[in-house]
Amino acid sequence: MSDQGRTIVLVSGGMDSCVTAAMMHKTGDELLFLHVNYGQRTQQREEKAFHNLAEHYGIPDNKRMVCSIAHLAAIGGSSLTDPSIPVSNADLHSEAPPTSYVPFRNAHLLSIAVSWAETCRVQRIAIGAVHEDSSGYPDCRPEYYAAFNELIRVGTAGAGISIVTPVIHMSKEEIILLGAKLNAPLHLTWSCYQNEEIACGVCDSCALRLRGFERAGIPDPLDYAVRPSYNRI
Amino acid sequence: MSDQGRTIVLVSGGMDSCVTAAMMHKTGDELLFLHVNYGQRTQQREEKAFHNLAEHYGIPDNKRMVCSIAHLAAIGGSSLTDPSIPVSNADLHSEAPPTSYVPFRNAHLLSIAVSWAETCRVQRIAIGAVHEDSSGYPDCRPEYYAAFNELIRVGTAGAGISIVTPVIHMSKEEIILLGAKLNAPLHLTWSCYQNEEIACGVCDSCALRLRGFERAGIPDPLDYAVRPSYNRI
């Protein structure tokens, strides 16, 4: 990856997108950062993390896009966007999508990225989707991205755009170790699905994060309301 | 098509979606109507047409969804959403997408429909995409919908949702004749990309509509600022 092109990076503000951005930064590509609010509980905190990461990588304002798709909250169906559905505590053994699953969410994010890419003639879109060590969301599977790339091929006017998923086969532990190696600013990221002030430590996203740091043997720089050990789960 | 299920119909307010709704109505399915504003010039007029069509088919308020995705206008790249790009007059011979092409637009609309369908357990989504007699948009091709259905298959949690495109192979003339046969309320539709008060008669969309009515031998019930003959083009 040394084509000196331009890449749109989907930056949620979490660790996976942070390390994805670090990898794309290392290619020498000019980066554009995209963040999407979809009515999720912690959207203000995530947007703050997005801007902190953008500052870190020197992304100017005109290369940052923040969009809001409030209709995902109106549609509901997820504990992330519907206040009447509680965020469930982590069950790292379950294969079913947790309550935080937002139906077909990533298609909305990727569609925005592709529209922006086609308009600005950017050919690469990077997303920090994780399959192996994920929460079991169907739109994080490798075959989902293969299908989306086919959709782009037939659904754009020959723009040559494709999505890359550089961390999709990594565990959280590997992502953290790679982030440390690339000096990715993991201290600026936010993962908790429940809180915006201090991470809860018990939601799916906190559990995956804490277990990843434990396994990597690196201290998590964030503070937590409670900090269970997930390493044996 | 007599499965007595439920169908979400994407209703822009134009003729193709009106006749698609008429076809779905005839199946006996319960219908849900979805309309998306994306910052297009004529969005107020199109939303009015949407509600008029919903009234006609007796769709209650809680089965209508109107979403706004303002970021497509912010991204720009189309004469429909960027006031600095003029709406070009029709060139029915050209195979290139006209200035009204909104990059990757239909993926945004379909993603909303799929999120809604998955949340409400609806299994069919109908869209009035037209390929044969269209403006040359890449996201109106049959292979685009095949790719989207594959994306749904791998990107949802086993919800069994699929998109149908019942008018995709029809000419505008055939759509109008079918609409007349099904008593579709074509007088309530709006097609013009340029104006909201009186249809311009010269944009791509007016040209395709007027040529269709001429060829069908049926008078177009709308008024036009100018009404050229397109039948020989």
Image: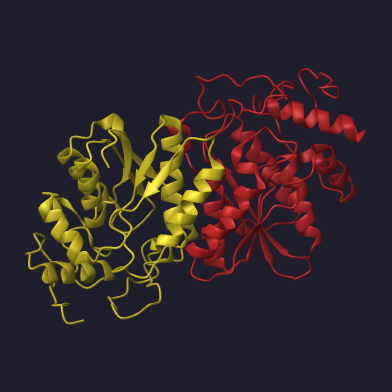
Chain colours: A yellow, B red
Q: Quadrant of residue B223?
A: top right
Q: Which quarter of the image is occupied by the N terminus of chain A?
A: top left
Residue drawn at point x = 11 percent, y = 60 percent: A222
Across and down, in percent, residue A171 comes to 24, 66
Across and down, in percent, residue A153 comes to 52, 44
Q: Is residue A70 visible?
A: no
Q: Is residue B3 above or below residue B41?
A: below
Say left or right for A145 vs B227: left
Across and down, in percent, residue A157 comes to 54, 35
| In front of the other: B10 or A132 | A132
Q: Quadrant of residue A120?
A: top left
Say left or right for B17 vs A108: right
Across and down, in percent, residue A114 comes to 44, 41
Residue drawn at point x = 63 percent, y = 59 percent: B63
Q: Is residue A202 above or below residue A17?
A: below
Q: Which quarter of the image is occupied by the C terminus of chain A?
A: bottom left
Residue sticking out furthest to the right: B217
| In front of the other: A179 or B84 | A179
Say left or right for B201 vs A97: right
Say left or right for A213 vs B211: left
Number of numbered callouts drawn: 0
| In front of the other: B208 or B49 | B208
Residue drawn at point x = 70 percent, y = 22 percent: B90
